[in-house]
């Protein structure tokens, strides 16, 4: 008998800060938790890169994935922030 677990859908998680894309009406994006299996050398390299860029490991992985998707034309570019009008006062 196999001890395979039943697949459970990823649960949406509210992010405490807005991300570059997919922000909801309150500026908070919905994120899904996803367990990731990754080779130890790749994870170590990603952690060093995250440390160099002052990001968390999770934020670095998401950043790298997002950039690769954009370069491949599989993700819309992030909306540009709107400038605050200066009334000259």
Image (tube, rainbow, N blue to C red):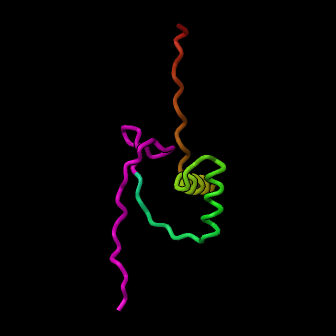
Q: Nearer the viewer, residue 86 or 58?
A: 58
The residue under the point 64% across, 47% down is 53
Rendering coords of residue 1 (x, y %): 35, 92
Q: Nearer the viewer, residue 87 or 42?
A: 42
Q: Farthest bottom residue? A: 1
Residue 82 placement, left or right of 45:
left
Residue range in magenta is: 1-30
Answer yes or no: is residue 74 visible: no
Rendering coords of residue 10 (x, y %): 37, 63
Q: Nearer the viewer, residue 5 or 25?
A: 5
Rendering coords of residue 25 (x, y %): 36, 39
The residue under the point 49% across, 67% down is 36
Rendering coords of residue 32 (x, y %): 40, 57
Quarter of the rendering containing residue 16:
top left
Answer yes or no: is residue 83 visible: yes
Magenta highlight: main SS: loop
Q: Farthest top residue? A: 89
């Amino acid at each position: 008998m196999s001890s395979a677990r039943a697949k459970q859908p990823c649960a949406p998680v509210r992010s405490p800060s807005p991300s570059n894309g997919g922000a909801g009406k309150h500026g908070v994006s919905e994120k899904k938790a996803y367990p990731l299996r990754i080779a130890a050398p790749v994870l170590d390299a990603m952690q060093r890169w995250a440390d160099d860029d002052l990001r968390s490991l999770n934020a670095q992985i998401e950043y790298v994935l997002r950039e690769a998707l954009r370069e491949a034309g599989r993700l819309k570019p992030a909306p540009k922030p709107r400038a605050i009008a200066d009334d000259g006062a």
